Image: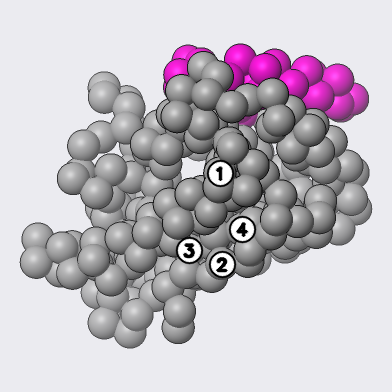
Amino acid sequence: MTPVSVTQGAGPIVLGLPHSGTFVPDDVRRALCENGRKLADTDWHIDQLYDGLIPDITTVKANFHRYVIDANRDPTGVGLYPGQNTTTLVPTTDFDGLDIWETPPTDAQIDARRIAFHALYHAALRAELTRVQGLHGSAILFDCHSIRANIPFLFDGTLPDFNIGTYMGVTCAPAIATAATGICNSAAGYTTTVNGRFKGGWTTRNYGQPASGIHAIQLELAQSTYLQDEAAPWTYDHAKADRLRPHLTEILTALAELTPTLRGTS
């Protein structure tokens, strides 16, 4: 198993896919409890949802599951949302607060996974952002995520369909957030929020440096927008996806067209 898959394109957008992978090494799988082996907290089929939306796009996908190590967490272990329930660099619970380990990993095992998986994903992502910026003068990281719309352990109520995160406007030029938000708000039958429960994960915050020409924005989709049910077997709903994909295409197209105006903007 290759920890990271990269598809290079000549366009200005890099799609980050840190949570769609399902690979778990045998030793890690043996250490998971029955609940953990369900791998429920996966961004199910998000790579399929985004596949082929616009030409010349670059994708960087983590093939390993987030229970091995979470590619969207600070490698030093610093938490994303202080004071709120969340999951850690190597999660100890699932999104419902239930244990996932029969035998939790040791610090040494976490360090080994950081090198073997987390570091490789981010080396690939950094390389592609650098390459794309070299082609266009600036690059946009579009970090692709999805999650169940109802998870009381993580948030109250029902999550909106489109959850845009820019870390309160820090990680990208205002025009990027404005374009994405406008398209989402205009999408009939969908709900949208900006910098709500999901303000952009570690990846968005780490790479989004608008003054340096690299912009980052996260889109967390409610899985109800493209899955038959937000439960196993997590079946991709082609009819729902076909309704959603044109809006995603419109967002990515608009951001690509903005790129020539973004050099060194913040």
Q: Amino acid at mark 3?
A: Ala
**Label 1 SS:** helix
Residue kind at label 2, given as amino acid type: Val
User: Is label 1 or label 4 in front?
Assistant: 1
Q: Earlier in the sequence, mark 2 or mark 3?
A: 2
* Label 2: which secondary element: strand
Q: What residue do we see at 46% from left, 23% from top?
A: 211
Circle 4 residue: 59
According to the picture, the residue beneath numbered tag 2 turns out to be 6
Residue 180 shows in this picture? no
From the viewer's perspective, tell me whether residue 62 is left or right of residue 220.
left
Check disc 4 and report its element: helix, strand or loop. strand
Q: In the image, which residues are magenta?
A: 163-192
Residue 175 vertical position relative to residue 205 in the rendered view, above or below? above
18 vs 185: above or below = below
Amino acid type at mark 1: Gln
